[in-house]
Image (cartoon, coloured by chain):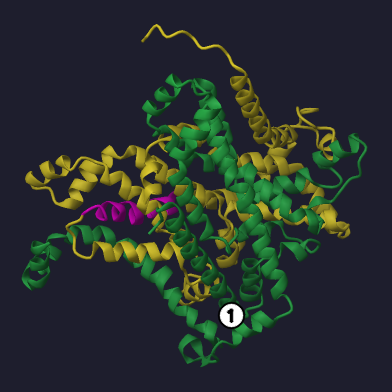
Chain colours: A green, B yellow
Amino acid sequence: MKKKEKTIKNGVCLKDRIWKSRYYYLMLLPAVAYVLIFCYAPMGGLQIAFKNYKVSLGMWGSKWIGFRNFTDFFTSYSFPQLMENTFVLSFYQILIGFPIPIVIALILNELKGGFKKTTQTILYAPHFISTVVLVGVMTTMFSPSQGVINTLLEAIGMERIYFMGEPQYFRHLYVWSGVWQGMGWSAIVYLAALAGVDPALHEAADIDGATRMQKILHINLPSIMPTIIIMLILRMGQIASIGYEKVYLMQNDLNVSTAEVISTYVYKRGIINMNYSFSTAMGLFNNVINVTMLLVANKVSKKVSGSGLF
Amino acid sequence: MKMKKRKKITLFDIVVHIIAALLLLIVLYPLIIVLSSSVSEPALVATGKVVLLPKGINLEGYKAVFKNPDIMIGYANTIFYTVVGTIINLIVTVPAGYALTKNKIPGRNMFMTLFMITMYFSGGLIPTFLLVKSLGLYNTRWILLFLGAFSTYNCIICRSFFAAMPVELEEAAEIDGCNPLRTFIQIILPLSKALLGVMVLYFGVAHWNSYFSAMIYIKEDHMQPLQVFLRRILILAQTAMNIEEGGEYAQAMADREALIRYAVIVVSSAPLLIIYPFLQKYFDKGVLIGSVKG
């Protein structure tokens, strides 16, 4: 401790240390330059959320208008629906999408040898398919005229349904296609954690005559709990930002009543209608919700389990 | 101990294997359907006759894909963006992860905080868009190469990986008069193939599959990546067809595109699906563990 104080107080010494680290700074330079330009400069651009941005006046020359963009958004006719769509979709996705990979990891962990490895490989495959292709395949499979799903429905005597165009199916299709694509890949993290479970625990349980189900519930699951908690906190930090790329691809004129979320609305109002200030304000609102949720989740986790992200 | 008897197959084993088989079925079925449809007679596909295996072998779809100028341009562009973009990603992200393992450099925690904040807070879509425009990168190939060049998440993975390496290597190199940059390139990197494999995969997949940036920042077709053309063929044309008749032009386009729809899915997805099993040993274990612990 004393040594550290000395080096910081002593200017020459700090200078020396910086000079000695010059090669490391060189390695950091591209990354720092990148985040300053592409992450921090846009944060400066957030000021237009509080301005009436005019392209002709520029970012700094435009007039301040306080919180008017925000109040406009909160009182707008689409606000309640956007909030509902965003949060229902997000909570639905967490509720279904978060536990499934954990269960899959616990199951895969019980498999052995070649079958385990092959199963893993195949379950990862959908992760490598692009969102465009995923939505394209869905559009095709659920197509009312040619889709295989409707062919099967008809075969068992049901009516053909235009799934992609019905607002009531949008959330299910979104969440479950996400499960299909991500369940194997998201299990990796838990599988890695399971590989680290102390074998002595299992041996002790064997001696006590525990069944395999008991071992899963009382050894494996508690062992990976810290990983689960950290993943959940991270997930909560994205609560308001659902993958707008996929939502946008799945949207059409018929299903927007449930498919429009804040982030896709930001894109439409901002990039397409060039309503820059207004959509920046919406984006900022979205971001603030995310950060708040992250902090709350972290705090709760610290209180309940004693461990958190930071 | 070696003499341990083979365990009996229990009910538990049966249940676990049945669940695993069901999961495999769920994952594989859509993939098989697409593959089967791509080599089947389009008329049979259109009437819903292809339910599992191909019917009436027909490779016209693939011929059409390779004759379609849009798809070929998109393919070439995507290869370019993926290769050059991934190289840029590696140059920006990997050395930074290595430097962050060094306690002795002043300001290390400041850099770490600088990076961490970007994980949770950003300027958002519109300010980034305005910045890109003001930098003159709008509608240029550069923007697709630079955007996302640094990833804090991947940088943390790199840092955990390098932190687990023995320091003796570097100390020996330092005594021999190597500067840290040379040590990194000549000693550390050759020992980091697992990490580099994972990074190439992560960044490469992101480049290969991205469409949103291109949709926002690229105006001209000759610079568009494959995914943008795929969106037109797979989603826009089909949705237009499903919602309404859309006139003769839409119908003609839909017919032409129905033929190549499945083939183009196969052709665009095959490279990644063929490559990843070879890298699986790297991402299955180890590399990710440290990153989760933060």
Label 1 neighbour load within 10 Å: few <14, some 14-19, many 20+: many
- Disc 1 target residue: A276
Q: Is residue B5 left or right of residue A148?
A: left
User: What residue span does the magenta drawing correspond to?
Assistant: B83-102
* A217 drawn magenta: no
Give the SS element for disc 1: helix
Write the residue at 9% across / 64% down: A2
Q: Is residue A18 above or below residue B234?
A: below
Give the amino acid at mark 1: Tyr
Asked if residue A145 lies left or right of residue A130, the reply is right
Q: Position of residue B73 (x, y in %)?
A: 59, 52
Q: Quadrant of residue B135?
A: bottom left
Q: Is residue B243 left or right of residue B98?
A: right
Q: Position of residue A126 (x, y in %)?
A: 60, 40
Chain designation of label 1: A
Percent across and percent down for residue A166 are 82, 56
Q: Quadrant of the N terminus of chain B?
A: top left
Asked if residue B250 lies left or right of residue B26, the reply is right
Q: Quadrant of residue B62?
A: top right
Q: Position of residue B98 (x, y in %)?
A: 27, 51
Q: Nearer the viewer, residue A47 or A219?
A: A219
